Image (tube, rainbow, N blue to C red):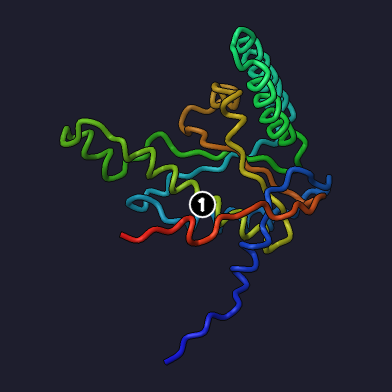
Amino acid sequence: MEHKLKASSLEDLINKRRSIRKYKPDMPPEEWINSMLRCASMAPSPSNTQPVRFIRISSTGKREKLYQALVSGKQEFLRAIQSKKEAKRLKNWINTYYRFSEFMFKTPILFAVGTIASYAGFSKKLLEEGILTHNKREETNLDITVGLALKGFILKGEELGLGTCILTGPLVFIPNVEEILGINDVRIKCFITAGFPDEKPDMPPRKSISEILSEI
């Protein structure tokens, strides 16, 4: 029997998705955002612990404190590299990632995304019982789960006509993000923005299947 690959609406969404850094000021409907969150909540997780949490940052005060921390972090980095041999290259690098981060404070919707501190998957339970001497898998498990949740979130957004952008760079500039947000039960892994796109970026280069696949 011959099997033919049919065009897929899911594949279309995946191919169309771009990281959006410019948004229209219009606020998306709440039911759209809730639908994106429901899709995120369907992600698989270790032992079905469902540890991923989305924290919506709507407070102007919280956004301003995060922004000031971002600025301070950049300034500290710039001071730290002054005596470095590659100071000019490092300065350009720092300024570039700063520009890639600061836009998030002007977006209609901003979430911090993380995992609960009380997460207890298989490897963590073995560690607590003294069967494992170290638990190098726990963070990997949590990172994978966050990634899967974000994939559902951004693809549902794409289907609704909303743009998104996942950011981890700001956490380099803002090491005390949980303290600023006033949370102690969630460890923040990234930020994600959402809104109506005000740009149409080209697709960046993608590796071919032969470049990402090996067989053993």
Identify which residue, 45 or 168, lies in the foreground.
Answer: 168
Residue 124 left/right relative to 164: left
Looking at the image, residue 131 lies above or below residue 141: above
x and y percent of residue 129 in the render?
Answer: 18, 35
Q: Residues within 10 Å of mark 1 (few under 14, many from 20)?
A: many
x and y percent of residue 172 in the render?
Answer: 57, 26
Q: Considering the image in quadrants, where does the C terminus appear?
A: bottom left
> Mark 1 sits on what residue?
149
Q: Amino acid at mark 1?
A: Ala
x and y percent of residue 135 in the render?
Answer: 28, 35
Identify which residue, 44 or 200, lies in the foreground.
Answer: 200
Identify which residue, 12 or 3, lies in the foreground.
Answer: 3
Examine the image and state in which quarter residue 12 appears: bottom right
Examine the image and state in which quarter residue 127 appears: top left
Residue lying furthest top: 83
Identify which residue, 101 or 145, lies in the foreground.
Answer: 101
Q: Residue at x 55, y 40 (%)?
A: 113
Residue lying furthest bottom: 1
Q: Residue at x 55, y 21 (%)?
A: 176
Say which element carries label 1.
helix
Q: Residue at x 68, y 18 (%)?
A: 88
Residue lying furthest left: 131
Examine the image and state in which quarter residue 51 appears: top left
